[in-house]
Amino acid sequence: MFTNPLLRFLLLALIGLSAGSIIAAGVFAFLAIIGVFPRLIGKTKTRSHIMLYETVIVSGGIFGNFWDIYEFPLTQVFSPIAPVLLAIFGVCVGVFVGCLAMSLAETLKALPVISRRIRLSVGLQYLIFSIALGKLAGSLLYFFYGMDG
């Protein structure tokens, strides 16, 4: 149907960008619906900076997509401080994933069900903290010992 390579390339680029935009919008909508962003804004008491939050979230998504597609060699550019940047990035991603997991668990009301099932009347925060420590220990073992299969 499309014998012209340029036309075929443009059509595929349009389809790819459209599909990627739809997926990205769905992910951001999911995160907003389960309350990750509103909870972080509420906990930090920075409701006056909502436009800044929106700009940073969208910019992060765009930058992350470009970084994933074009694979910028940032470790070569920032080679002296690459381990520090990697550690900061790892902590930020860990905090985000933890917030995401807790928002999802709270949305699904999983924690009250767990506490009722195991008849836990006090100490729920210790249960949550021990689960987080277990995930941290597992992640560290995975990365330090290269347990990738």
Image (tube, rainbow, N blue to C red):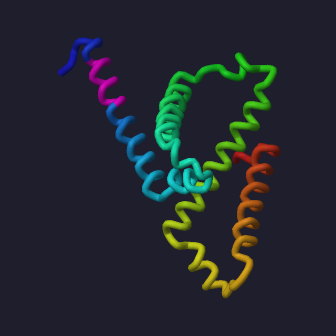
Percent x, y of residue 104: 53, 62
* Residue at left offset 77%, top offset 60%: 133
Query: How many discs appear?
Result: 0
Percent x, y of residue 138: 75, 55
Residue lying furthest left in this view?
A: 1
Please determine whether, in this image, residue 32 is positioned above or below residue 134: above
Percent x, y of residue 94: 67, 48
Q: Quadrant of the N terminus?
A: top left
Q: Specify start and end residues of the magenta stretch as a single range.
A: 8-17
Q: Nearer the viewer, residue 7 or 14?
A: 14
* Residue at left offset 76%, top offset 44%: 143
Q: Residue 67 falls in which quadrant of the image?
A: top right
- Magenta span contains residue 11: yes
Secondary structure that dominates the magenta span: helix
Q: Is residue 130 left or right of residue 26?
A: right
Residue lying furthest bottom in this view?
A: 119
Q: Is residue 87 left or right of residue 59?
A: right
Residue lying furthest front in this view?
A: 48
* Residue at left offset 22%, top offset 15%: 3
- Magenta span contains residue 106: no
Q: Residue 131 falls in which quadrant of the image?
A: bottom right
Q: Is residue 112 left or right of residue 139?
A: left
Q: Nearer the viewer, residue 105 or 6?
A: 105
Q: Residue 114 falls in which quadrant of the image?
A: bottom right
Q: Nearer the viewer, residue 105 or 42?
A: 42
* Residue at left offset 34%, top offset 23%: 13
Please determine whether, in this image, residue 39 is positioned above or below residue 121: above
